[in-house]
Amino acid sequence: MAMNLRTLEAAGLTGRSGSAFSTACKVDAARQNGAELIVNACDGEIGALKDAYVIRHHLAWVRHGAALTGLRNVTYAAHTGTETEERLRAAGVPVLPVPARYVASEASALVSLHHGGRARPMTKRRRLIEGGRTPDGNRTRPVLVLNAETVLRIAQIEVFGPAWFRSFGIPAEPGPRLITITGAVKAPGVYETESGPPLSRVVSLAGGPLPGVLALNIGGLSGTWIDASRIDSLHYSTASLATVGTAPGPGVMHLLDRSRCPVDTVKDMLDYAAGESAGQCGPCMFGLPAVAGDFAELASGVGRPGAATALRQRLGFLVGRGACHFPDGIAAFTHSALEVFTDHLSAHAAGYCPVYESRGRR
């Protein structure tokens, strides 16, 4: 039996993939359009592990939550060759195998793949739940894409009630939520938390930071960098994190210690991003490689005078121009790196790296 949408609305559940949009509104619109459902269990962001965690430990709950949406033809999306795909197939549910590429698990890319097209983001002239066209020009049926954790929470709300759900978090962002914490912590892994507590308390779920943490990345490539000195002054909420230009997003957190050069870390991540273009929009095809190239010059210490300023200007040309938000995320990610790692970039420009110098490597 489908869930009463008033129950879902009363709980205040929002998407756990980073969109933070009302799940009740999404499901309502999907029902009105007779949409199908894709449960996204791809862990598409760098460092994300929570989808795999949900499928490994809570698949029965997820299947119950999917049934409660009242939508037809439920399909589970997972990256090809992963443990998640194997578990889903073993459970006998319909599986959409997704290429292990960054943009392939974006919602519209999943819809395109589901309709026999390529796993590339679609230009959204209409909402996916109203139907559309793949990059190849094929019509798509109405489809709603929900993150695996979001579907898990639907089941929990039906069983435990909206009041239970709202007993976690803050009024503006209620409910428990999962977060992946990796890097310079004592016990990397997936943890259950909520909105509102001090950011330092969230980090303590993973045993706390190791000595010498330099910076914190929230949100992977779609997020930003925060100087470690800011951790104690922030809370894990949209309002607090907005003061440093970020948000809880898809629930990914990585702490960088001083044994790894932050400039080289960002360079490697931008090189990866440049290679993950879907190859159909100018900002991805040309803008991301250009950004990666500009940052590589800065990292090597051979950047032209004003190179950092030129890079900031280039970042402005990426925002709002792609079929998906990949270029927007990279712009914010790179801008934060330029701000947080200014001293390290200056050192590279002077011909040395503070990290490698301290270890006798440069």
Image (tube, grey):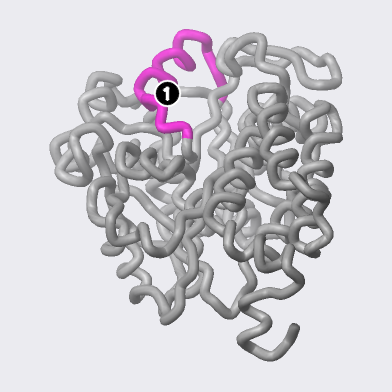
Q: Residue furthest bottom?
A: 360
Q: Is residue 156 above or below residue 361?
A: above
Q: State which region is magenta.
A: 19-36
Out of 72 and 152, give the one closest to the viewer: 152
Out of 238 and 99, give the one closest to the viewer: 238
Tell me which corner region of the image, top left, top right, bottom left or bottom right, holds residue 318.
top right
| Residue 246 in view here | yes
Residue drawn at x 50%, y 62% as measured from the top left: 254
Out of 83 and 176, give the one closest to the viewer: 176
Residue drawn at x 66%, y 16% as measured from the top left: 124
Out of 41 and 328, give the one closest to the viewer: 328
* 263 falls in the magenta region: no
Residue drawn at x 58%, y 10% as measured from the top left: 130
Helix, strand or loop at mark 1? loop
Residue drawn at x 74%, y 39% as measured from the top left: 310
- Expressed as whole percent of the image width and height from the top left, the position of residue 208 reads 34, 74
> What amino acid type is highlighted by mark number 1?
Gly
Task: Report which residue position mark 1 lands on.
Answer: 70
Mark 1 is surrounded, within 10 Å at the Cα level, by few (under 14), some (14 to 19) or many (20 or more) other residues, namely: many
- Expressed as whole percent of the image width and height from the top left, the position of residue 348 reads 71, 67
| Residue 94 in view here | no
Q: Is residue 255 above or below residue 68?
A: below
- Drawn side of residue 174 relative to residue 344, left or right: left
- Expressed as whole percent of the image width and height from the top left, the position of residue 122 reads 72, 23
* Quadrant in which the N terminus appears: top left
